[in-house]
Amino acid sequence: MKINLNELANRFDFDQIGDTNHEVDGVATLDKAQGNHISFLSNGKYSSLLKDTQAGIVIMSKDSHESYSGNKILADDPYVAFAKIASLFQNSSQSLTGVHHTAIIAESAQIAKNAVIGPYSIVGEDTVIKENTVLDAHVTVGDNCLLGSNCIIKPNVTISCDSHLGNRVIIHPGAVIGADGFGLARDVKGWIKVPQLGGVSIGDDCEIGANTTIDRGTLENTVLENDVRLDNQIQIAHNVHIGAHTVMAGCSAVAGSAKIGKNCLVGGGVGILGHLEVCDNVTLQSMALVTRSIKKAGSYSSVSPIQETKEWRKSAVRIKQLDKMARQLSKLEKNKSK
């Protein structure tokens, strides 16, 4: 699509400066952009690229736009503005309509007239799929599920029985919603599987990354509140509860019955142990391991930073000696106080 500066600014209620008729049909970085591209500057360290950029339009901060004389859109947060505008140029491969003849739909399922069910997809008994929701190819939806309106379920997603999705949910390829939680009881003869009888509840505007797994609850549901965003390859165990607007980066894992508050930022590779609580507005830096509940908002880190191997080995030896050193120090302090 082609759209000019004036149309872009008016559509999103942004200020504009420059040739209002200049058209763009794509997005690019400042150093790669040509006259038909829109780009953005949100980090000051890239300001030097402005003098040579060929971008047709640049999205900039209202406070620093004087440094550039070309066509520009002014925004309080250029990165947020770019995210909104870039969605106009997103390449959508959606060409499906209606219910494909290879799809298998249970007789008791309720499918909205304008919903889309792609090739070889399966919809189970008593499942409801609402308006404008799209199931791409090879999607499986189990019994007694609810998919709200305007959801996008991409290829090879599995949504097991008793899973409920809100409106505008996006699930990327290979994700599994509602697999059995890892519930086991030890008997004298070995392990006994604990039946997982709950479901999964996902709120409005959530996004689930590729190959991410969200397990069903044991008795009650596993819950994602509204606007939770999960990256690829994340494990959410049974009965976890994640508060609204929380974001988790790739390869993180949350053990059973943990509760994460609202507006949290969880870095890549973070582990959160079971039955813990993380309060609202917490940032967990990448590779952190949460072994106790966090009751105060703020930023938390763990795991030693990378070192040369020979230095790391020295540190590892010293860590093993800490208990002995602490005991010696305590003994010296007691002797000193006598």
Image (cartoon, grey):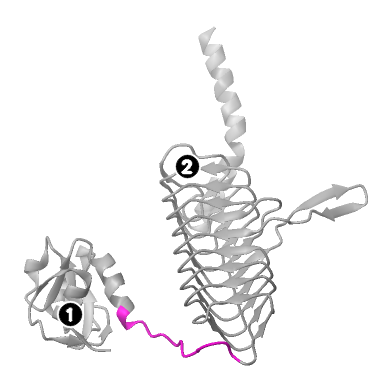
Residue 208: numbered disc? none
Amino acid type, residue under disc 2 in the picture:
Cys
Q: Quadrant of the N terminus?
A: bottom left
Q: Which residues are magenta?
A: 88-100
- In terms of image quadrants, where is residue 199? bottom right
For disc 2, the neighbor class at 10 Å (few under 14, some 14 to 19, many from 20) is some
Figure quadrant of residue 55:
bottom left
The residue at the far bottom in this view is 101
In percent of width and height, residue 125 lies at: 70, 73
Residue picked out by circle 1: 7
In the depicted view, which residue is nearer to us: 84 or 335? 84
Q: Which residue is mark 2?
A: 279
Q: Residue at x 31, y 80 (%)?
A: 88
The residue shown at (31%, 83%) is 89
Relative to 148, is 11 on the left or the right? left
Q: Position of residue 8 (x, y in %)?
A: 20, 77
Q: Position of residue 264 (x, y in %)?
A: 43, 51
Q: Does 48 appear in magenta? A: no
The question of residue 91 being in magenta is answered with: yes
Disc 1 and disc 2: Cα gap in Å? 42 Å
Residue 30 visible at all: no
In x, y percent, where is residue 76?
Answer: 19, 61
The residue nearer to you, when weighing 257 against 221, is: 221
